[in-house]
Amino acid sequence: MFGYVRPYKPELKIAEYDTYKAVYCGLCKQLGRSFGPLARLTLSYDFAFLAALAMAISPDKPDMKRQACAFNPVKRCLCCQQSTELEITADVAMILLYHKLRDNLADERLPKRAGSWLLLLFAKRPYRLAAQRRPHAAAAAETAMAQQARLEAQRCDSIDLASEPTAGALAAIFAGLGDDPATVRVLERMGYFLGRYIYLIDALDDIEQDLRDNNYNPFVLHYGLLPGDTQAIAAVRRQAKGVLYMTIAQIGSCYDLLELQRLGGILGNIVYLGLKNSVNTIIHQAEGSKMDERPL
Amino acid sequence: MKDPYRVLGVTADASDDQIKTAYRELARKYHPDNYVNNPLGDLAQEKMKEINDAYDTIQRTRQGGPQNGQGYYQQPSSFADVRRLINAGRVAQAEELLDGVPQSRRDGEWHFLKGSICYNRGWLEQALEHFSRACELNPQNPEYRAALNQLLWQRQNGYVRGGGYQQHMGGNHCDCCDLCAALYCFNCCCNCLGGGF
């Protein structure tokens, strides 16, 4: 589920890249402060985006300082200092990670299953801490998991309905970042489509594996895919690209309505270029073709 | 009121041309066409108004330029009540009314409205299906066609027509698309300003 929401580096300015890294470093350190050093290994791009978005709409300017880091003690990098936005993001990241692991445990077979089980054991206590601090986010994720299980049991073949639980959870989580009613409405819809994007790009990424393992996948069911039919699979990937592009367009039209105080360069890059780039990367990898220098 | 220069994202010493360009860029981004059926349409409209006001204010302070006046049209509908509900944001009720319509009466308008409700919910695939069906049933209707084309465009390009990332993309490409966009944009500026150019 994680790692699809990232910037498209070739179009990022160096100053923007440095700031993005500062958010990323800040979130890493926050995970350590909130849940202990092991939790820092769960850091992902998606939540760096969430943190950056929260900082961008916050009235308070984020505090950044040059600092050394345990993973690279020699180099001192720009790093965001502790803030409410980072605390919220770290908690949300832990809540979603925990549910992702639970989901993996249900889907996977041995020996991978054992790995997920072990990770879940480690994630349990941090999850409880995070859920205590953010009951709304935890409840949203909990509801989404239950809805998802129901849809999968029914072998739901509607792309819209299959992505609804994840979309709904992120809608609730995003809405929690805003203060005034108009911003909350925009964030809610943006979260909805970002959740839809994350769910569907993950499904796109997993088409072949899910076919092999006979796991639930909305694209497989919707288009009636059969294992081994490479041509049909390639055609469905093209369809899925369209589905995702449409979703990205919606994220963009919500994003345009946000009143940003800062970080617009990075966020715009992620929303307009990075999201599409992730889709294209998956498709090019699956087809074994090399990506153009400027795929956009 | 907000600083009009800030609204347009320019400095107070920007040239008239820079202001015009910034205005066109923003007007294209928040044009009502980009937010048809979108529950956030009212916010886009507010933005548009803010931009128009800012542009007007600057024009007025600089040279006593043209004044505004913006018209919005509504088409007559066979499901006028449903349309009203959708416009008022009461999607659940609208859908209830629509679902009660017998199969034999489900015309192009029905599919268009059903598609609008799906779109409102974020169910883009179903929205696309209904808009396509509406266009099949009424190939001449420009409203249905526009809704379908908007989604097909997004499917192809990954951003809302008129929106996107052009301003950051670097390099001054000028292809026929840009030209079309410029004309389209110029046209919409003229409309917003009551043909003041």
Image: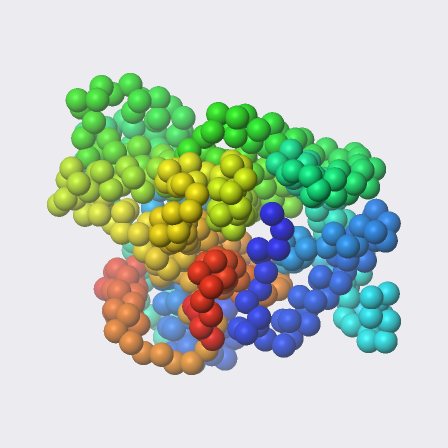
Q: Left of A85 or right of it: where is B9?
A: left
**Rendered view: A143 above or below A208:** above
* Nearer to us in this view, B188 or B29: B29
* Nearer to us in this view, A62 or A219: A219
Name the quadrant of the C terminus of chain A: bottom left
Q: Position of residue B176 (x, y in %)?
A: 25, 73
**Rendered view: B80 above or below A217:** above
User: Is there any visible trace of residue B186 in the rendered image?
Assistant: no
Q: Position of residue A147 (x, y in %)?
A: 56, 28
Q: Quadrant of residue A63?
A: bottom right
Residue in the picture at 68% in, 55% down: A44
* Nearer to us in this view, B124 or A259: B124
Residue in the picture at 41% in, 57% down: B158
User: Is there any visible trace of residue A70 in the rendered image?
Assistant: yes
Q: Position of residue B155 (x, y in %)?
A: 36, 53
Return the residue found at the far left.
B140
Q: Position of residue A227 (x, y in %)?
A: 43, 43
Q: Left of A159 or right of it: where is A29?
A: right
Q: Quadrant of residue B48?
A: bottom left
**Rendered view: B149 above or below A293:** above
